[in-house]
Image: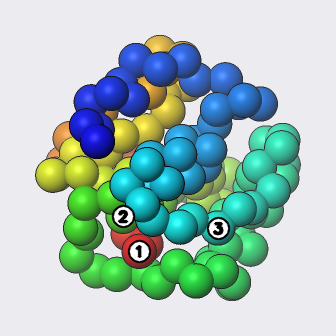
């Protein structure tokens, strides 16, 4: 599989949001990824909170490996708003709202935007 095959796919919150993307990419790499309720913006916020309390088999790691899930958080109004992607060779494949598509961005560049970055395997 080629991580670049996902770049440019359309982003649609209902049909292909960031957690759908993580699950799809990891499934194509032969990795199981738990389902969380991501049917609405409120549900996805709860899913990230619930996932931290009960990661359903995922384990948080310090050093990423290819196809690890990446949680990216930014502080907003006293809480952390989470986003997710997939790590690959120093890059993160993720759905970007502004461009309405999947992008492949350097992890180093994303550190300028996100104050919280976690890796899950």
Residue 70, percent from left and from top: 41, 59
- State whether residue 40 appears in this view: yes
Position of residue 1 in the picture relative to residue 41 (left or right): left
Position of residue 64 in the picture relative to residue 60 (left or right): left
Q: 87 or 114: nearer the eye?
A: 87
The residue where tag 2 is placed is 68
Report helix, strand or loop for mark 1: loop
Residue at 39% x, 29% y: name it: 6
CA gap between label 3 and label 2 equals 13 Å
Q: Residues within 10 Å of mark 3 (few under 14, many from 20)?
A: few
As drawn, the label of residue 19 is: none
CA gap between label 3 and label 1 equals 11 Å
Picture quarter with the N terminus? top left
As drawn, the label of residue 121 is: 1
| Circles 1, 2 touching at the beta carbon (< 8 Å) | yes
The quadrant in which residue 57 appears is bottom right
CA gap between label 1 and label 2 equals 5 Å
- State whether residue 111 appears in this view: no
| Circles 3, 1 touching at the beta carbon (< 8 Å) | no
The quadrant in which residue 67 appears is bottom left
Picture quarter with the C terminus? bottom left
Residue 22, percent from left and from top: 51, 50
The residue where tag 3 is placed is 34
Q: Earlier in the sequence, mark 1 or mark 2?
A: 2
Q: Residues within 10 Å of mark 2 (few under 14, many from 20)?
A: many
Q: Earlier in the sequence, mark 3 or mark 2?
A: 3
Residue 117, percent from left and from top: 38, 63
Residue at 33% x, 27% y: name it: 5
Report helix, strand or loop for mark 3: loop
Q: How many marks?
A: 3
């Amino acid at each position: 599989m080629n991580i670049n095959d996902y770049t440019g796919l359309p982003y649609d919150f209902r049909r292909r949001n960031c957690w759908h993307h993580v699950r799809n990419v990891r499934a194509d790499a032969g990795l199981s990824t738990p389902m969380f309720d991501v049917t609405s913006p409120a549900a996805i916020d709860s899913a990230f909170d619930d996932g931290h309390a009960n990661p359903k088999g995922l384990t948080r790691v310090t050093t990423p490996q290819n196809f690890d899930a990446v949680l990216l958080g930014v502080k907003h109004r006293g809480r952390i708003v989470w986003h997710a992607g997939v790590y690959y060779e120093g890059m993160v494949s993720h759905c970007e709202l502004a461009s309405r598509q999947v992008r492949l961005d350097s992890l180093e560049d994303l550190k300028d935007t996100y104050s919280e970055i976690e890796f899950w395997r």
